[in-house]
Structure formats: structure tokens, C-alpha cells
Amino acid sequence: MGDRSSDKSRRNGAPNPAAQDAKSQKRWRQGAKRDTFPWINSQIITVSETGQLHKLIATIEAFLPQMNLVNISTAFHRLAKATSKDVSPQVMGQQPVIQGLLEAAKATLAKSSASGTQPSAQALSNISWAMATLHLVDDHLLQAMAIPASSQVPSFKPFELSTILWSYAKLSTLNADACYCAQHLFELASIRIPHTVE
């Protein structure tokens, strides 16, 4: 009899407690994730400031499965900065953590594209700079970044725009296709840049 009244109340538009609870849990998980991303960033930055590359790599590897694109860009950026001091780009490029970051960046950008979410201009700029600094040519990732970067050229700060353009140009010295996939980005930037110069 309880089941019948429950069915009747659902048909009459009354809320389903189980469905409401599932929605609440989903919202809580999404909120918890949002809180986790800034914390992950702070952990990467704090460890990178110790100057201990092995600890930075271990921290990035530990958090990699939970990272969003901003975390990935911070990790890439900090590894590239550490490389200029401690190890050569070629040695760093062979580290498994680098391959993990490349794959994570591609997967995250694919999700952004599928959901229609624009990635952060700063994140795209930082990842491209790190790739150029580390001499990393990944055609799929470069293409995946060039498309959203092209659509949001006006959102880039001048420094971010010059950085991403420099990065693609630098990478094209290693692989000519790097600049080719960003051709539209360069064209749109050439229209935008004169308007940002005072």
C-alpha cells in the first residue's frame, strides 16, 4: 500500500526522495572537485618552490588523475621552469610524468570541446610555452589547443597571446606542422595585435 501511495505521489508531481538525494550527492561531488583544483595547484606551487625536482615530479604524478586543465598547465609550467635550471629539455621530455601530462591535457581538452566549455587562455598559453621549452611536439595536443585558442583570441592578455604565438613558432622549428595547425590562430592574432598596441 505504501508503494502505491508513493507511485501515486510521483505521478502527481511530488519529488522523488531517492532522485533528489542522487542530485544532491552529484552537486556535492562537483563542489568538492571545484575545491580540490585550487588545493592541487597550491600543492604543485609549494613543492616547486623547494627546488626539489624529484618531489615536484612525485607530487604531479600523485595528483594527475584528479587534475583539471589549470592544474595540468601549472604542472607543465613548473616542470619547464625547473628544467631550465636542473636538467636538459631532452632528459625531462623522456620522463613518464611528461607523457602523463600530455595525455591528460588531450583528454581534458576533448571533454571541454564535447561540452562546449572554453579552456582558460592562460592555461593554453602556459602549456604551449612548456611544450616549446621542453621541445615537446605532440601534433594532436597542438591541434587541440589551437582550435579553442583561435576562437578566443580576444580573451588572451597580450602576454598570453605573444607567448602562445612564440610557442607555436618555436615548435615549428622542430616540426613544421606545429605552425601549420595554428595558422588560423596566427591570422586572427595578426588582426587583434594592432588593436592592443597603444
Image (cartoon, rainbow, N blue to C red):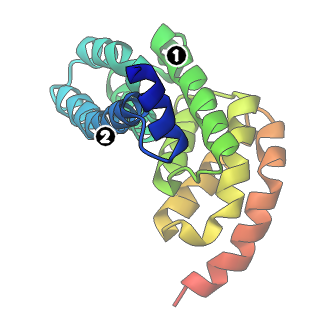
- Work out which residue is located at the far bottom of the displayed protein and give it: 198
- What residue do we see at 36% from left, 33% from top? 17
- What residue do we see at 66% from left, 77% from top? 192
Q: Identify whether 28 is placed above or below 181.
A: above
Tell me where residue 104 appears, x and y as whole percent: 54, 24
Q: If you read the primary sequence from the N terminus, does the residue marked by circle 1 or circle 2 appear first?
A: 2
Tell me where residue 48 appears, x and y as whole percent: 24, 29
**Which amino acid type is marked by label 2?**
Gly
Which disc number belongs to residue 100?
1
Tell me if mark 2 has few (under 14), some (14-19) or many (20+) residues whose alpha carbon lies within 10 angstroms of its own. Answer: few
Q: Secondary structure at mark 1?
A: helix
Say left or right for 78 vs 144.
left
Q: CA distance from mark 1 to mark 2?
A: 25 Å
Q: Quadrant of residue 75?
A: top left
Q: Quadrant of residue 145?
A: top right
Tell me where residue 95 appears, x and y as whole percent: 48, 10
Tell me where residue 4 appears, x and y as whole percent: 47, 25
- What residue do we see at 44% from left, 21% from top? 3
Say left or right for 41 vs 175.
left
Q: Quadrant of residue 49?
A: top left
The reply to whether residue 10 is visible in this rendering is yes
Pick whichever, 30 or 84, lies toward us: 30
**Which amino acid type is marked by label 1?**
Gly
Q: Identify whether 161 is placed above or below 113.
A: below
- What residue do we see at 48% from left, 45% from top? 126
Q: Identify whether 75 is placed above or below 35.
A: above
The reply to whether residue 87 is visible in this rendering is no
Say left or right for 21 vs 136.
left
Q: Which residue is mark 2?
A: 31
Tell me if mark 1 has few (under 14), some (14-19) or many (20+) residues whose alpha carbon lies within 10 angstroms of its own. Answer: some
